[in-house]
Structures are given as structure tokens and as C-alpha cells.
Amino acid sequence: MMVEIIHISDLHYGSEFVGEYFDNIIKYIEDAKPDVVICTGDLVHKGRIKEFKAILPYIQKIREITRFVAVPGNHDAKNSGLVYYEKIIGPRRSRMLLDDKDTILVGICSARDDMSEGMIGDEQLDFTGRCFNKNLENRILALHHHLIPPPLSGQKFTTVRDAGEILELTQLFEVDLVLMGHRHVPHAYIFDNNRTDTIFLYCGTSTSNKVRANDSPCFNHIFLEKGDLEVYMVNSTNLEKNLLLERREGLTKFVRPRRTRIEHLLTSEVWDE
């Protein structure tokens, strides 16, 4: 049974946030009517209560259309912001069963107060494993920080400190899809073309101009069914769609939205002798 997901991330209300981009996304959600919208963190920029209150009306518009799940990012956790996040947005971790779609979605908190890097910890690892111990067709994990650094996204060490444990969990429980944000880079990692392998999907910044290189603000539109997957990267400024990834019958086609560092280096005249 197919589940349809809109994946947004890194809204950054309070820093280069553009309300028009969010209005575009809400219009897209109204037209698409997905089963769920997932936000992988950094809803606000400084963790201030006034920022959470300001972003809430946009979130409420989404909730009027469909189900909504969010996990906090490192910017949400600034200035003790997780306290306000839980009061205004929702719990820092959650489990959602989409019974009509034979799907389970688990959101976990990788953010810590005033820290850029992420960490999950044993308690959340246990929570996640128990959540996924279900005989459901589609299994999705959402967190803010990247488990594997995406290319051309800066050199800061801000991955999840215990990423190895989470990567191991995704394989043990045959998680279909891991959704992440944090570095404002739309990307995907596929380690094999096996139909049952986990795909690690990153989202760019959806509603701000805090982009990298010549990227555009964007979000992901996902279709998942029995291991088959289709992901479109949607430009938040004009809602133009481009295929990012497609998996059919065990074969994965990945269309990169950006060049890697090695491609830039190989074509650079700086190194020519």
C-alpha cells in the first residue's frame, strides 16, 4: 500500500525565513493531500519562544490539511528552546502509526541544548528499536542531524556522535527510509541496489535563503510502496519538481541535484601544472 509523504526541513524562522516560500509549500500540500508531512528540525533559528509562536500558524495550517510530525533540530534547542518546542510544537520524539497505509513513522530527537552536533543515546535507541518491532510494510525514521555527511555541505563535525548505533539499527529492523536535514543539502545515499536496503534521504532548507552554493530552497515529495520509492525535489520558490531518486524492482536510479567536491576539483584549473 502506497504512503505519500511531504518532507520539509530547516525552516529557520528568525533568520532569512521567507513566508512566501512556506505559503507555496502549504498550497502544494493542499493540492497533493499527502498522508503525512514530516519536518526534520530547525523550525526556528534561536530557540526563542516568540519564534515558536510565530511559526505555529504555518504548522497549524498543515495540521488542518493532514497529519504532521516534527523533530527538533539544534537551532530549536538553542537557549533552552526544547522547553518551548515541547510546549508549542509537540513532543521531541514520537511514534505515528498510519494503519490505513501499513506504515510506522518514528521521530527521534538528535538535538541537545546549545550543541551543534547530535546524539541519540541508549534510551532513545531502545525506544526506537521497540517502536520498529512491528510487522508493518513501511518503516520510516526521522531525525534532524545527518548520520552520514552529505557532499559539499561544509566541514563542521556536526553528525550524530553515536551514528554507528543508529545505522546498525536501520539494518537490524530493515528500515526503508531515514529522513534528515541539518546541512541544507538535498541528497540521498544508497549503499546497494537491493530492494530492501535502507535509503538515507536529506532535505534542503525549505523556507529560508540559507542555501549552499547555487541550491534553491526545497522540500521532498515521497512515494513509498512495498520498498519501491519515488522522490521528487520540489523548489519552494516556484514549486518546480525534479526527480531525485527512483527505486523500482530492486533497481535504484539516483539523480544528483548537485555536483560533488571531487567533480569540482577534477574540472578546476587551480591544480593544472
Image (tube, grey):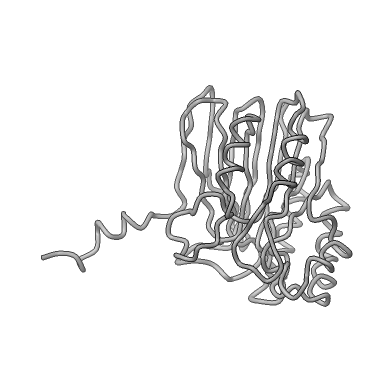
Q: Position of residue 191 (x, y in %)?
A: 46, 35
Specify the quadrant of the image occupied by residue 115: bottom right
Up/down of 100 relative to 42, above or below:
above
Quadrant into which the C terminus falls: bottom left
Q: Position of residue 200 (x, y in %)?
A: 56, 43
Specify the quadrant of the image occupied by residue 208: bottom right
Tell which of 5 and 12 is nearer to you: 12
Residue ID at (72%, 36%): 129
Tell which of 20 and 166 is nearer to you: 166
Residue ID at (71%, 72%): 78
Up/down of 244 relative to 210, above or below:
above
Tell which of 221 and 38 is nearer to you: 38
Residue ID at (64%, 61%): 206
Q: Residue furthest front?
A: 122
Residue ID at (57%, 70%): 210
Q: Position of residue 157 (x, y in %)?
A: 50, 63
Up/down of 154 relative to 46, above or below:
above
Left or right: residue 176 versus residue 43 is: left
Up/down of 156 relative to 165, above or below:
below
Quadrant into which the N terminus falls: top right
Left or right: residue 273 versus residue 87 is: left
Specify the quadrant of the image occupied by residue 258: bottom left
Q: Position of residue 127 (x, y in %)?
A: 77, 41
